[in-house]
Amino acid sequence: MIVFAASGDNDSSDGGADPANVDLPSSCPFVVGCGGTMKPHDANAEETVWNDDPGNPNGSGTGGGFSELFRPMPAWQAGAPHGPGRMVPDVSANADPYTGYNVLVHGRQEAIGGTSAVAPLYAGLFAAFGRKLGLVTPQLWLNHTCFNDITQGDNGYFRARVGPDPCTGIGTPIASKLGKLFEALDKPPVHPPRGQRRNPTRAIEPASISGSNGAMLPVHCRCCRAPSALSARRCSKGASTCCSRNVNANEWSRRDPPASSLVDFPACQVARP
């Protein structure tokens, strides 16, 4: 299950005495923090950080900053400005009440905003991508191009910049690109029909190669660096174990093998180091 949470509507102070605070639960590493922008009605106008009183850390505007509770900063927030802990928000969307969302309340139409409108916007968007997506935040941070980078404005204590920032995260969604991304990730692996044998003519990967002095050297998997003696020339589908030997990746030699001994094993699905 994916959880989206608002980053707050009181700028960087989040309504506290200090100029920089972050909201819970949006600052939790297992929650996608949602910040706010001001998206003008004019399609040609630039989208900026939502802050009704620029420079004021305790006004009406998007929350954002760095957690001092969840330390250190998650590794998947690569590219974020340096801070003591997890950066908030991860993503953002229009939250300015003046350009926000038209809703009907007791038969009356009115415009609303706030980051509390952004979180359900993302929930609806990701519901369209399928079920059982799991923790998507690392995948989002690996795909900045699926978002519009917001580079202008501030939330009081922090300013927007090129790239991730504690005002709008990695930006606002490009739904078409996100749809293609999660469509590709959601596709199941293709297996041969039951009873169909694998191609018997496929070449067998060598267990060793000849070195410059004529000696036979063991080969290593180019992906996970496992020696063929451990991997039986084929890495398992697990992320850190090796074929039937069940050898943990950390038990392999930390020293990289020579480039000349690296061989591509098609079945290797271990993440590249």
Image: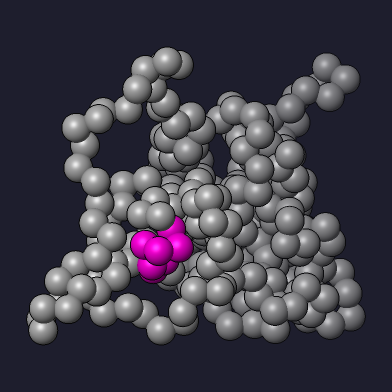
Q: At 51% from the left edge and 33% from the top edge, which residue is drawn?
A: 186
Q: Is residue 49 visible?
A: no
Question: In x, y percent, where is residue 258?
Answer: 26, 79
Q: At 41% from the left edge and 27% from the top edge, which residue is drawn?
A: 190
Residue 157 position by quadrant:
bottom right
Asked if residue 63 lies left or right of residue 147, the reply is: right
Q: Is residue 162 above or below residue 147?
A: below
Viewer-side residue, 4 vs 257: 257
Direction front: furthest residue: 215
Q: Is residue 190 above or below residue 49?
A: above
Q: At 32% from the left edge and 78% from the top edge, which residue is drawn?
A: 257
Residue 260 position by quadrant:
bottom left
Asked if residue 229 lies left or right of residue 262, the reply is: right
Give the colour scheme shown: one colour
Question: In x, y percent, where is residue 108?
Answer: 81, 22
Question: In x, y percent, where is residue 130?
Answer: 59, 28
Q: Is residue 17 above or below residue 58?
A: below
Question: In x, y percent, where is residue 134?
Answer: 66, 43
Viewer-side residue, 11 vs 145: 145
Q: Quadrant of the N terminus?
A: top right
Give the magenta part as a residue range. Answer: 224-231
Q: Quadrant of the C terminus?
A: bottom left
Q: At 50% from the left edge and 46% from the top edge, which residue is drawn?
A: 237
